[in-house]
Amino acid sequence: MIENKSVLITGASSGIGKACALHLDKIGFKVFAGVRKNEDGEKISQLASGKLTPVLLDVTKGESITDTVNLINSQTDFPLFGLVNNAGISISGVLEVTPVEEFRKILEVNVLGLHAVTRAALSLLRKNKGRIVNIGSAASLFSLPGGSSYSASKFAVRAITDSLRLEVRPFGMTVSLIAPGAIKTEIWTKADEYRKKMQQNISPELSDAYKMFKVAADRLHEDIQPSSPLEVAKSVEHALTSKKPKILYLVGGEAKRAYWINKFPRSFVDKMIMKEIQG
């Protein structure tokens, strides 16, 4: 099934994207690894087989997307079968202290970028009855205080996935959502650094007003044990190779808990969350 088939992975410079690129390359796919810098492409090439091809891809730039899709289309020996929409960024903070420009940036990458790449690649994928795998998050299932911006972007990814899955079904295509919890990657570290930076830069008045949420967030980050990005890569493999790929893949304890918590009445959940936050 894998032979002579290619997969495009966005955001393959590090973390989940890099793990997916190397894993899919290892099992036999022709991987086009989307990176934003030449040096990142060189690094991942050194770890992969000769089949892996790094491509300069900025999901927020239309010309970059078009160039990448045209390059893949020119590789006639390896028709495009899979698209893994992984590129993403993360920010955290209560709404009142989150700058609008930061929120706009996360939507530009996580949502509009995914939309643009998918739209550009769909004609190739449709010809080959291909598969699309969108990397969501536990935050696409359940939103906590301080996570509205990131959750909003990932809720949008889930909505796009649900609609697109039915839109392309008549073509013999499948669309899956991977919902990881905390994963040991750079995005997790960067999000933690951003959170601490925001806490330092807000006014004393706001810092005091939202103190309980800061304390709860610090406690949560200390308690969480992130999973390996390889676990996500294995779920992506299943979504691309199984005769019956899942609609939703939950990776890690946080994702599974978020899924089941979402089954309870929201008023009950709100009370439980506030009780935990207030200690």
Image (cartoon, helix red, strand yellow):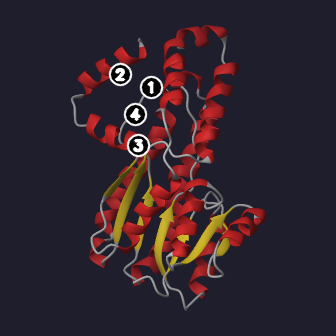
148 or 215, which is in the foreground?
A: 215
Identify the residue position indicated by label 1 in the image: 145
What amino acid is labelled 3 in the image?
Ala
Q: Are marks 4 and 1 in contact (CB under 8 Å)?
A: no
What amino acid is labelled 2 in the image?
Ile
What amino acid is labelled 1 in the image?
Pro
Q: Mark 3 or mark 2, which is nearer the start of the sequence?
A: 3
Q: Mark 1 or mark 3, which is nearer the start of the sequence?
A: 3
**Residue 54 x %, y %:** 67, 72
Q: Are marks 2 and 4 in contact (CB under 8 Å)?
A: no
Identify the residue position indicated by label 4 in the image: 143
Which image quarter is the N terminus in?
bottom left
Which image quarter is the C terminus in?
top left
**Residue 3 x %, y %:** 46, 87
Q: Secondary structure at mark 3?
A: helix
Identify the residue position indicated by label 2 in the image: 273
Identify the residue position indicated by label 3 in the image: 138
Left or right of residue 241, residue 153 in this image: right
Tag in front: 3 or 1: 3
Distance Cα–Cα, label 3 vs label 4: 8 Å
Q: Are marks 2 and 3 in contact (CB under 8 Å)?
A: no
Q: Are marks 1 and 2 in contact (CB under 8 Å)?
A: yes
Distance Cα–Cα, label 2 vs label 3: 16 Å
Does residue 37 lie above or below 82 as drawn? Answer: above
Distance Cα–Cα, label 4 vs label 1: 7 Å
**Residue 17 x %, y %:** 56, 60
Left or right of residue 143, residue 246 in this image: left
51 or 104, which is in the foreground?
A: 51
Q: Mark 4 or mark 2, which is nearer the start of the sequence?
A: 4
